[in-house]
Amino acid sequence: MSILEDTPVRWITREDIKVDRVACPWLIKRFVDRDAEFMFVAEHELLAAASREGATPFDATRLPDVKLNHRGDRCTLEAILEDFHLTDPALQQLGRIVRAADVKGQEAVAPEGLGLRAIAQGFAAMGLPDEERLRRQFPMYDALYAYAQKDAVRHV
């Protein structure tokens, strides 16, 4: 069941997922649509597959028709936070960490980003299927969220 009305149940992005394309499914499953299903396809197939499957595409920066995408220097996770009105300060901090890891030139936004980038590259180097990358990395994002919650409390 979707947490927000009219939220799509199927989501689709480019295959060979790394930082933002792991963080976005985590955010969607935890805060937008707990029953969400994710599909991963070659970039050149993304829009056709999204149409055919009735899925919402996300994080395809070379495809301007994809609404949930990088916006300026901000990552796709931050676009989802914005579009779904998720204003939790810990999620906003997590968005900055993901941006620092995912967007070249944004490393200084959050020092934790370089570590997240290294971990994501390590999971990619292991050659795991995308679904397995999600399964193994969701607990890491749960931990980053808990870290950001604790950090947000210190700054209140």
Image (cartoon, grey):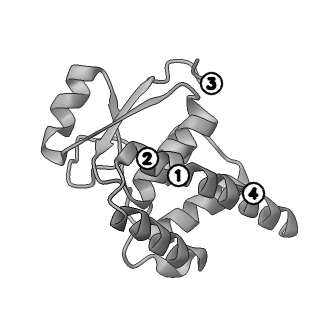
Question: Label 2 is placed on what type of residue?
Answer: Glu
Q: Secondary structure at mark 1?
A: helix
Q: Work out how far the residue at label 1 is from the one at label 4, CA to CA, in angstroms.
A: 17 Å
Residue at the image position 57 percent from the left and 67 percent from the top: 97
Determine whether, in the image, residue 43 is placed left or right of residue 123. Answer: left
Mark 2 neighbour class, 10 Å CA radius: few under 14, some 14 to 19, many 20 or more: few
Residue 45 shows in this picture: yes
Q: Secondary structure at mark 2?
A: helix
Q: Work out how far the residue at label 2 is from the one at label 1, CA to CA, in angstroms.
A: 6 Å
Residue 76 shows in this picture: no
Q: Work out how far the residue at label 1 is from the one at label 3, CA to CA, in angstroms.
A: 24 Å
Q: Secondary structure at mark 4?
A: helix
- Which numbered disc, 1 or 3, marks the residue closer to the eye? 1
**Residue 3 circle label:** 3
- Which numbered disc, 1 or 4, marks the residue closer to the eye? 1
* Residue 50 found in image quarter: top left
> Mark 2 or mark 4, which is nearer the start of the sequence?
2
Q: Is the residue 120 above or below the residue 115 in the image?
A: above
> Mark 3 or mark 1, which is nearer the start of the sequence?
3
**Residue 146 circle label:** 4
Determine whether, in the image, residue 109 is placed left or right of residue 71. Answer: right
Question: Label 4 is placed on what type of residue?
Answer: Ala
Q: Position of residue 12 (x, y in %)?
A: 33, 36
Q: Tell whether label 3 touches label 4 (CB within 8 Å).
A: no
- According to the picture, the residue beneath numbered tag 1 turns out to be 136
Residue at the image position 41 percent from the left and 42 percent from the top: 131
Mark 1 neighbour class, 10 Å CA radius: few under 14, some 14 to 19, many 20 or more: few
Q: Looking at the image, which is closer to me, 124 or 18?
A: 124
Mark 3 neighbour class, 10 Å CA radius: few under 14, some 14 to 19, many 20 or more: some
> Mark 2 or mark 3, which is nearer the start of the sequence?
3
> Mark 4 or mark 1, which is nearer the start of the sequence?
1
